[in-house]
Image (cartoon, rainbow, N blue to C red):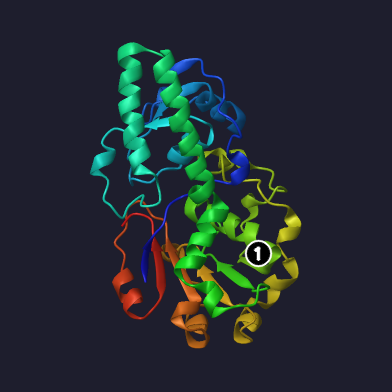
Amino acid sequence: MLHPITFSIPLEKVVTEIPKKTKILSDLIPGKLSTYIYTNETDYYNEYKQSYFATTTKKAGWDCMRHYEIIANGCVPYFPNIESCPPRTMALLPKDLIVEGNTLYKRFLESGATEENVKAYFDLTTRFLKYMRDYLTTHRLAQYVLNKIEFKKNVPDQKSNILFLSGSTYSDYLRCLTLHGFKSIFGSACHDYPKIPHIYKTYMDANRLYGKGISYSNLLEDYLHDDSLDTKIETLIKKKYFDLIIYGSYHRGLPFFDLVNELYKPNEIAMICGEDIHDCNYGDYVKRGYNLFVREL
């Protein structure tokens, strides 16, 4: 019942073709604050689009939104020491392709953008983009969660209702992007409570969000949140209106948990941990039959 999980990225952020390149390595260097010059998503993405490679590294945790933004923009991540990553951490990323990219980057440093190197680069980038569309978009990640908990077997009705609960509405990459994935599958039938305002297009202050809201804010039409449900969540839980309850970050709060635990079977509840550094008690939850999805295993 313990499953690895990673960040993801909306499909609309993924390029449809490999952009023209003007430099071998992006000037944006993780940890070098003087290179953090981008104030909007377009300029930030363009930096990766024009680069053959971009450096990414382990920060507080191994998984990092930068990995996905590099790949989505038709750039290959250069990831030193990727071989040291634990096998169940970043388990959904194509680590074999990243290792291949590290080797190819060294070839570019040795001999430049030769015809042979560029051909190998375009082949590798094409495989990266295909892998991202197949496994690393928000839609695919939500489907991964559903598959792991065998949701279709539990609820054969295609008009299932999902309740996505949060203890706070602060920025949280894993919570926000996974919620976007569930919204892309179920629409308003996946209800976020409380409403996560910054994932909707009506949100007006994305620059104040963590990372300026890049890649995870202003994504959804406002009608995909049914405001009329917000005042009766507890009543709807008691009526078992929802077929699946998801806690977007169990470290950051478990609203209605006693009630949910009383009325729902453990396999009808999914719990997510997206923290970089944590001391999880997930063993206790797993023993009780809950499905737990942990990012940094």
Whether residue 160 is situated above or below residue 7 in the rendered picture: below
The image quarter in which residue 18 lies? top right
Work out whether residue 194 or residue 116 is closer to the camera in this orientation and state it.
Answer: 116
Q: Residue at x 53, y 32 (%)?
A: 73
**Does residue 167 appear left or right of residue 237 in this picture?**
left
Q: Hey, what amino acid is under mark 1?
A: Phe
Residue 239 placement (x, y as % from top left)? 64, 86
Q: How many marks?
A: 1
**Circle 1 residue:** 186
Which image quarter is the C terminus in?
bottom left
Work out whether residue 159 or residue 156 is closer to the camera in this orientation and state it.
Answer: 156
Residue 40 placement (x, y as % from top left)? 59, 31
Which image quarter is the N terminus in?
bottom left
**Does residue 244 appear left or right of residue 227 in this picture?**
left
Q: Residue at x 46, y 30 (%)?
A: 123
Residue 94 placement (x, y as % from top left)? 39, 44
Q: Residue at x 30, y 21 (%)?
A: 106
Whether residue 105 is situated above or below residue 153 in the rendered picture: above
The image quarter in which residue 4 lies? bottom left
The kind of secondary structure element at disc 1 is helix
Spot the residue most to the left. Answer: 84
Judge whether residue 210 can be spotted in this image.
no
Residue 113 placement (x, y as % from top left)? 42, 14
Few, some or many C-alpha atoms within 10 Å of disc 1 (few <14, some 14-19, many ≥20)? Answer: some
Judge whether residue 181 can be spotted in this image.
yes
Work out whether residue 296 or residue 18 is closer to the camera in this orientation and state it.
Answer: 18
Whether residue 69 is situated above or below residue 24 in the rendered picture: below
